[in-house]
Image: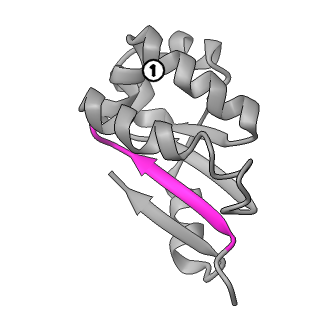
Amino acid sequence: MEKENLLIVLSSGDREVALKFPLLYGNVVLERGYWKTAHLMLWGPSIKLIAHDTTLQEKIKEMQTSGVEMSACIVCVEEYACVEELEALNIQINHTGELLTKALKDESYAVITL
């Protein structure tokens, strides 16, 4: 089975890491036909980073416009008190471990973690 679905897990709180890879690559993967589906999952410190950086928020919106789906770990979002900020960005807040586990077990997914 060929991999056709991409899951990018961003847990780093490093702004440069976010800007120079997942938010850059993730913005073009669907329109260029690299992947059939793409999903950006925010976990840990990346949640706080995205919630408080308007430049990163604009990149998130661009990715969503291109068709990339997004979610964030509910436990982390609540611990960082960023529920309102992520809801305003239309990022699904849920138990991300379910999708991560599914993707890790499913041969049609490629999973990248940062």
The residue furthest front is 32
Residue 31 within the magenta-colored segment of the rendering: no
* Coordinates of residue 30 in the picture (x, y in percent): 71, 51
Depth check, front residue: 67 or 100 = 67
Residue at 43%, 26% (x, y): give it: 77
Residue at 32%, 51% (x, y): give it: 114
Q: State which quadrant residue 110 falls in.
A: bottom right
Q: State which quadrant residue 45 falls in.
A: top left
The amino acid sitting under disc 1 is: Leu
Residue at 62%, 45% (x, y): give it: 28
* Coordinates of residue 16 in the picture (x, y in percent): 27, 31
Helix, strand or loop at label 1? It is helix
Q: Which residues are magenta?
A: 4-13
The secondary structure making up most of the magenta span is strand
Depth check, front residue: 7 or 75 = 7
- Quickly name the residue at label 1: 56
Q: State which quadrant residue 92 falls in.
A: top right
Left-right relation of 74 to 63: left
The quarter of the picture where the N terminus appears is: bottom right
Residue 95 in sight in this render: no
* Display coloring: one colour
* Coordinates of residue 51 in the picture (x, y in percent): 43, 16
